[in-house]
Amino acid sequence: MINIIIVIFQIIFIVGLVAFWIYFFLVENKNPERTEVYRVFEKSFVIADLGFALPCSILSIYGILTEQKLGFFFSVVLGSAIIFLFLMDFCYNLQQGTYKKRDFDTILEIVLNIYCAIFGPLYILFGWFNL
């Protein structure tokens, strides 16, 4: 049962990740209200997100569903990647005063940060104890 729950949350991660990058490049990247600092910071995550965290999540899901050890291994790798991305994002948001704002983007940022802070360690523990 826990395997299915982990898979569901990793699918949510994939959907959210892909949706974010589509939204970023179609909307946020062209938004004149967004600073150049914000755009450069976000663009620095493209390869880490789509080139590393996304494939790790896909491999983890595949391995968990097919009951292969690689699923649990990639759950650990994904968890560590999510923690790193969270810490980078958290530091940026603190430095830029993002958390002081009261708008929809800030709420989304906080939700994303909470997801990463909770599920990064959870994926590591899940994978580690199932290897």
Image (cartoon, rainbow, N blue to C red):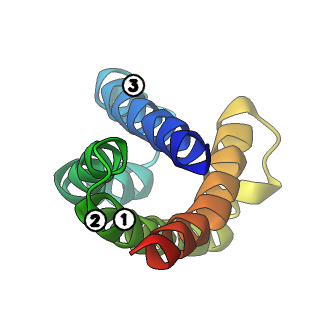
Residue 75 vertical placement versus 7 (above, below)? below
Local crowd size for mark 1, using a 10 Å CA cut-off: few (<14), some (14–19), many (≥20): many
Residue 130, position as x, y percentages in the image: 46, 71
Which residue was labeled with disc 3?
23
Quadrant of image for the C terminus: bottom left
Q: Residues within 10 Å of mark 2 (few under 14, many from 20)?
A: some
Q: Which residue is mark 2?
A: 69
In contact (CB < 8 Å): disc 1 and disc 3 = no
Task: Measuring from the top left, give residue 5's x and y in whole percent.
Answer: 59, 41
Q: Which residue is mark 1?
A: 72
Badge 3 amino acid: Tyr
Left or right side of 121 for 79: left
- The answer to whether 42 appears left or right of 129 in the picture is left
The amino acid type, in three-letter code, at marker 2 is: Lys
Spatial CA span between label 2 and label 1: 5 Å
Number of labels in the image equals 3
| Residue at the (28%, 65%) spot, across then down | 69
Residue 1 in the figure: left or right of residue 52? right
Where disc 3 sits, the SS reads helix
Q: Residue furthest top?
A: 26
- Could you say which is closer to the camera, residue 124 or residue 15? 124
Q: Nearer the viewer, residue 41 or 48?
A: 48
Is residue 34 visible from the viewing direction of this image?
no
Q: Where, by quadrant of the figure, is residue 71 drawn?
A: bottom left
Disc assigned to residue 7: none
Q: Position of residue 70 (x, y in %)?
A: 24, 63
